[in-house]
């Protein structure tokens, strides 16, 4: 049996007619830049995520970049973030002439550890840290109550890297009251990626910034279009960060199905969890299954605390298992084999930090297929193949 890591053909087969109609409508309109499809998507994503404003941009990377530009991050500044995520989170900081500063991760959620954040901020006697970027990794929100509290204590803006987490919800607890906040809606900005492999993936690159702050939204709108308003009058230096109308049209079609896809992913994750628990592998410490750290707050009708952009296992002999899975036609991936603080491009800064949990995760984790169209038979084959490797 062949089980791909992701099967976009299966998704396209269900949406082909609607996608083709949406793309053809844009082609017939000749409104390729900005236009009603982009405005419509911005309004729909903002409403879906519980934000007041959405600004479509050219990629998830550019969403992070333009958010930091709007905050004035630049030469000599530092930005606090996680060492365990995709390079874009750090790359945008470096592109602005600033430097990344890292706090280690929580070993259960893989997200940044607020207590480690506090230690880093307490040691920042020069006050160079000007912003915080928590990443909602793999589709589960970071501990935003703690993060936002620490940020307020130090007077720092929070830019949420929600590239993998659109629609994921975080339980904000006030006594007995639980209010679910969606990823991206809690900081000054939330940044989404519409890369094709994301839960809400386009037919190419795309991204969005959401915010509750109208003035901040206006600044992002200027920056994404060379800082110009009106045309040819440039009040600031921006870039060409616009979202294509073709991408917006396709994403509007897919957005209608997103909650269903989230449910299917969480159901697939639950089936994996059950099968791995019954496999005999857990007690022998061969593998550890992931957990939804906010699951206890879900009431069955509200709250999707983990949307499983990836399904991650901790395993012994990770590289050997990866080779075994690939040999047996099972797609898998390592997110991420080299933590950011060890990347060569940091030059003399590389390796100056000790991030044991991030380094351990980089050596022990592997992603399995989790896409919505995955069948029970495919999942059974995946688990049985892993069982054969270890037992």
Image: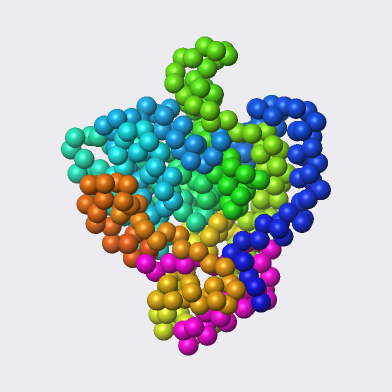
Number of marks in picture: 0
Q: Which of 178 and 4 is in front in this view?
A: 4
Q: Position of residue 196 (x, y in %)?
A: 61, 50
**On the rendered image, what quadrant is the N terminus found in?**
bottom right
Q: Residue furthest bottom?
A: 391
Q: Nearer the viewer, residue 23 or 41?
A: 23
Q: Is residue 35 above or below residue 129?
A: above
Residue 310 in view, yes or no: yes
Q: In this view, does 357 lie above or below 37?
A: below
Q: Is residue 15 above or below residue 228?
A: below
At x 40%, y 80%, the residue is 285
Which of the 4 quarters of the picture holds residue 356? bottom left
Q: Where is residue 139 in the image (x, y as percent from the top left)?
A: 52, 54
Image check: 101 left or right of 26? left
At x 45%, y 42%, the residue is 160
Q: Is residue 104 found inside the magenta-colored segment of the image?
A: no
Which of the 4 quarters of the picture holds residue 42? top right
Image check: 260 left or right of 116? right
Q: Is residue 386 found inside the magenta-colored segment of the image?
A: yes
At x 73%, y 44%, the residue is 253
How has the structure been colored for display? rainbow
Residue 154 in view, yes or no: no
Q: Nearer the viewer, residue 161 or 100?
A: 100
Image check: 379 left or right of 110? right
Q: Nearer the viewer, residue 46 or 364?
A: 364
**Which portion, as a residue range, is magenta?**
363-391
At x 58%, y 72%, the residue is 330
Q: Position of residue 284 (x, y in %)?
A: 41, 84
């Amino acid at each position: 049996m062949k089980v791909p890591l992701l099967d976009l053909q299966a998704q396209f087969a269900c949406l082909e007619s609607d996608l083709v109609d949406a793309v053809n409508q844009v082609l017939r309109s000749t409104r390729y830049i900005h236009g009603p499809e982009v405005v419509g998507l911005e309004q729909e994503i903002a409403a879906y995520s519980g934000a007041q404003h959405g600004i479509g941009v050219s990629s998830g990377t550019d969403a992070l970049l333009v958010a930091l530009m709007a905050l004035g991050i630049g030469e000599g500044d530092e930005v606090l973030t996680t060492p365990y995520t995709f390079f874009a989170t750090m790359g945008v900081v470096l592109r602005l002439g600033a430097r990344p500063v890292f706090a280690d991760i929580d070993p259960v959620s893989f997200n940044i550890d607020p207590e480690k954040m506090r230690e880093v901020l307490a040691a920042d006697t020069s006050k160079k840290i000007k912003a915080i970027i928590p990443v909602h990794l793999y589709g589960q929100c970071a501990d935003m109550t703690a993060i936002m509290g620490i940020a307020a204590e130090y007077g720092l803006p929070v830019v949420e890297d929600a590239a993998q987490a659109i629609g994921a919800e975080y339980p904000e607890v006030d006594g007995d009251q639980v209010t679910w906040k969606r990823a991206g809606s809690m900081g000054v900005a939330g940044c989404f990626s519409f890369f094709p492999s994301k839960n809400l993936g386009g037919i190419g690159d795309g991204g969005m910034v959401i915010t509750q702050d109208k003035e901040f939204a206006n600044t992002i709108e200027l920056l994404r279009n060379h800082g110009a308003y009106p045309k040819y009058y440039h009040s600031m230096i921006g870039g060409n960060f616009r979202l294509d109308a073709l991408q917006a049209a396709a994403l509007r079609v897919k957005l209608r199905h997103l909650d269903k896809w989230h449910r299917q992913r969480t159901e697939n994750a639950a089936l994996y969890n059950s099968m791995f628990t019954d496999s005999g592998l857990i007690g022998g410490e061969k593998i550890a299954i992931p957990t939804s750290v906010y699951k206890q707050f879900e009431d069955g009708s509200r709250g999707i605390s983990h949307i499983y952009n990836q399904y991650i296992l901790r395993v012994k002999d990770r590289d050997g298992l990866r080779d075994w899975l690939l040999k047996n036609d099972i797609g898998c991936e390592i997110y991420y084999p080299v933590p950011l603080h060890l990347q060569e491009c940091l030059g003399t800064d590389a390796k100056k930090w000790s991030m044991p949990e991030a380094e351990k995760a980089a050596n022990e984790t592997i992603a399995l297929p989790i896409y919505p169209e995955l069948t029970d038979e495919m999942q059974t084959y995946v688990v049985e193949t892993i069982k054969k490797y270890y037992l």
